[in-house]
Structures are given as C-alpha cells and as structure tokens.
Amino acid sequence: MAMSAVQPTFVTPLVPLQSARSRTALRGVVQLPAEVVSAGSSTEMPQNSALGSAAVVAVAAMGVAAARRATAGRRNAVKSRVTTCASATGTHCTEYKEELLATAKALTTPGKGILAMDESNGTCGLRLQSIGVENTEPNRQRWREALLGTKGLGEYCGGAILFTETLYQDTTDGKKMVDLAKENGVIPGIKVDTGLVPLVGGNEGENWCRGLDDLKERTADFYKAGARFAKWRTTVRVRDHSSLAVSEAAHGLARYAAICQSSGLVPIIEPEILLDGEHSIDENFETFVETWSAVFKACADFGVMLEGVLLKPSMVTPGAQSGTKADATTIADYTLRALKKVVPPAVPGIMFLSGGQSEVEATLNLNAMNQSPNPWHISFSYARALQNTTLKTWAGKDENKVAAQAKLLQRAAANSKAQLGKYDPATADEDASALEGMYVKDYSY
C-alpha cells in the first residue's frame, strides 16, 4: 500500500500530571489550558495544509502566553498572601530598623543579661503564696517595684521582661514602672503571647501558643507605653512530639517576630525544649536541632531581620525524670554544638532560660559556655534563677526590701561574671537557697 508524503506538523504537548496541592506544571514543560489542547488537535485540519499548521501554531502560542500570564498572576497572589510586607528581609520594619539594631546592641552589652519578671498574675501569686503573701494587686506592685527599683541593676541586666499589668502599673509613689526601670538603666520589655492551649491534631498533651490575632495592635500600644523588646514562649517536648508541634511553634514564632519588628520591638524567640521527661541528653540535642532549624526556616520565609532578634533557648540537658545529671562542661558542650549547627551568626544574642535549675547551676552552666569565644553574645534571661533568694529574703516585708535588693544584685553580678566566663564558685559566697533546684513539671508562666 502506497504511503502518502508526510508533511511536518505541530504536535500539541499533553497536559502534565498535577498534584492535588499544586496547579504548577512539571518543571520545564509548558502547560496549556484544556481548551487550547482540544483546539490544537492536528486531526482537525488537513495535514497537507500549511495554513492549517500555522493556525495551530498560532493558537498554541496564544495558549502559552495566556498560561504564562496566569502563572505570573498566581505567583504574585501567593507572594502577597505569604510574605505580606516581608518580601525581602527587613522591609517590614524599615521605619524602626536603626532603633531595633540599637536596642539589640544595648541588650547584648558585654556582661549584661535580662531579668525575666513576666510571670502572669496567677503565677506571680504562686510565688507570693510560697512566702505567705496574699496575691493582690498591691502586693504584686510592691514585689515588682522592689525588683525594678534595685539600684545598680542596669549594670548587670540590660533589660527586664514585664507582664502587661506591670507595663502599665504605677509604683507606690505614683511613678510609672517603666520609668523606674529606665532610671536604673534597664530597658523595658513585654510578654506578648497569651498562653498555651492544647494542640488540636497533635499528640496527646501537646500545646501551641496563642496571641497572633491582635498582636499588631497590641505591640503598637506596648511600644507607645515604653516597651522596646518582647517575648513569646512556646514549648516542644523531647519524646513523642509531633511534626505539627514543631511546625506550629516555628510558624507562630516567626510571625510574632516579624510583627514585633514592624512595631519597633526586638523579639525574643523562645521555643522551650521541655525539661520534663526521661529523655537522654542526646535525645534533647536532636529535638533542639530539629526545632530551631524549623524556626529559622520560618523566619527566613517571613523576612525576619535576624540582626534585630534575640533567642531564649533552653540548655541541652538530660530529662528531669531521666535519673541522670550532666555536669556544666557536658551541658555547655552539647548546647554550643547544637547552637552552632542551626543559629546564624547574624543573630546578636542568645539569652538562656534557666528552666528550673538552681541559681548556682544556671550560673555555672552559663559560665562554662563562655570559656571560649562564641559567634554570639551568650547570656541569661533568668526568672526563678534570679529571683528565688531575693523573694525569700523580702518575705513580703517592706523593712526587708533593701536586703532583698542586695541579694538580687549579688545574683545578677554572678551571672554577669558568667557571661564573661569569669564566675568562680569558690569565691562567690553563695546562699544556701541558691543551691535549691526549682524544677516544676508542666511549668507555665
């Protein structure tokens, strides 16, 4: 059977397979709309017609152009939804960039750390109850005033994290608490998360942190009230944690950080790896790296300016119920190795939480981490590990205020030396209460 001469024809490409979550064509292949494919079928025109082939090519070209325009439109829409005003690092905080950098620099002055006194009214009440003092607003006022009014505190603590009540609270003589802090050389900060709640879809007992919905409005108000940095705490446990818990922690912290920077507040990022559990120090290390890697990926996605953030990690230690203890040298080694795996050197400061360690343990571990140079300012953001002896000395009595403040200065000075790697327990003259462990299972602020 004689074969007819075959004329060159344009073959319309098949529509590539698509995933359920993406409308993007396979890489390197142009996807045409279905109507273009059907219109371009080579069987609809005589194969020996040059005009027919040209028409098909023209239709296909129009389809390619339309597909490219649609793809560009989709990309722009996604970009506007995901990055909001953070398409490039720092563009969301241009107005406050220099102030953010100056605040971060002040908080990371050599020898300085942060006093964490952002306990909620309920948690503060438990502290007061431990010394036989009723949880009332006047008693919380007297306690917080005693801390912020400590003369010379700013030599060792560049900042203090406050609870909302404290930020707007007056002292007993009518002065603003924020002004009292500033007079002592202490930059006021503010806790902005609204607490942990059960994580739906996560494993039993896991939590996530709320507070993003109205965060922009609140941070703008906090800035006007005198705050210049903020803190957001969420938690991830070591054993049996879900990928959802890690991703939710990372997303929430990155969104919080970008919003804070857009309002002029330096964000302290705190995904606490919980001490609760029987896990080994190696398991803690793995969870630390996993969680912080996700956090920095999310920060990059949302354009967070890393030069204007601080971190508040937990130290890498064995679990509280593991039955094992690690010495300061071991904890420092594991913690620094974890940090060097995941924390960019652009971050100016890492301010550790104490996590229920005794006052002396927290100081010893910090000192061990500063025995050699680090890419970052390695320091403290302690609450109980600065306040325990001070609270017991005060005991709710005004006549003990000066003595209590002396204890706070002693503790702050010890951690200042540890930040410089110069703490010597042999000459520290520590109180017995400074050796008391303060771990509380399922602790909340």
Image (cartoon, helix red, strand yellow):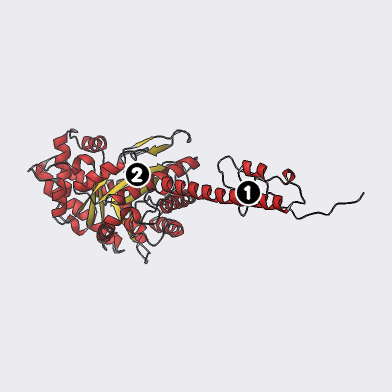
Residue 176 visible at all:
yes
> Distance between the Cα atoms at labels 1 and 2?
57 Å
Q: Is residue 183 left or right of residue 87?
A: left
Which part of the image, by quadrant, shows the C terminus?
A: top left
Residue 237 visible at all:
no
Vertical placement of residue 14 versus 8, above or below: above
State the residue position of label 2: 233
Using the image, tell me which numbered label, if any, was put on residue 154: none
- Residue 154: horizontal and vertical position, in percent? 19, 57
Residue type marked 2: Arg
Residue type marked 1: Val
Secondary structure at numbered mark 1? helix
**Residue depicted at 19% across the width and 33% down the height:** 135
Q: Which of 281 and 444 is in front in this view?
A: 444
Density class for disc 1 (Cα within 10 Å; few <14, some 14-19, many ≥20) is some
State the residue position of label 1: 59
Choose top left, top right, bottom left or bottom right for residue 22. Answer: top right
The count of marks equals 2
Secondary structure at numbered mark 2? strand
Badges 1 and 2: C-beta atoms under 8 Å apart?
no
The tag earlier along the polypeptide, 1 or 2, is 1
Q: Which of 19 and 321 is in front in this view?
A: 19
Choose top left, top right, bottom left or bottom right for residue 199. Answer: top left
Q: In this view, does 396 lie to the left or right of 436?
A: left
- Residue 28: horizontal and vertical position, in percent? 62, 55
- Residue 67: horizontal and vertical position, in percent? 56, 48
Q: Nearer the viewer, mark 1 or mark 2?
A: 1
Q: Which of 209 and 205 is in front in this view?
A: 209
Vertical placement of residue 241 versus 431, above or below: above
